[in-house]
Image (cartoon, rainbow, N blue to C red):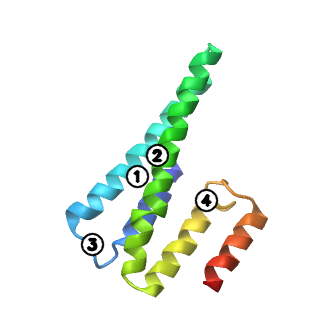
Amino acid sequence: MTTPILLAGLVLLVFHEHGKAGEVGGYLTSVIVLDVLMIVTGLILSLAAQPMAKWIWYGWSCVEFLGVLYLLWSPLQSQALSRGAALGTVYGKNLIFSVGPEGLKLITDPASVWAFHRHGAS
């Protein structure tokens, strides 16, 4: 269950020294609940016996994953960028780090290097 901790770190980074309690809690709760639901539906998927049930649970897990990605890449990234270039850069690099081989392993080493390079160049 390390992904909720990684996601909590990203959310808290965005609101470092600038967030209001309700604002932080809303994003933090949303991201962590979606992540935990994604993990649980993945577990149910692996335990399901019927192929159709597996596809249904897989679909729900994908929807929850897309919800996490949306929150990280849209409103939270905008919040980070609005609070200054330094925070936006740190948030972007932490986001790449969390989805890269060092974190969730959603992208490969070459993709991670490319993303760091592109993020540093912009």
Give the distance between the C-alpha atoms of the residues marked 2 and 4, in whole angstroms.
Answer: 13 Å
Point out which mark residue 35 bears.
Answer: 2
The disc labelled 1 sits on which kind of residue?
Answer: Val
Residue at (34, 76) in percent of width and height: 16
Give the distance between the C-alpha atoms of the residues marked 1 and 4, in whole angstroms.
Answer: 14 Å
The disc labelled 2 sits on which kind of residue?
Answer: Asp
Mark 1 residue element: helix
The earlier-in-sequence mark between 4 and 3 is 3
Q: Position of residue 116 (x, y in %)?
A: 66, 75
The earlier-in-sequence mark between 1 and 3 is 3
Q: Residues within 10 Å of mark 4 (few under 14, many from 20)?
A: some
Residue, disc 1: 31
Residue, disc 4: 99
The earlier-in-sequence mark between 1 and 4 is 1
Mark 4 residue element: helix
Q: Is residue 70 above or below residue 45?
A: below
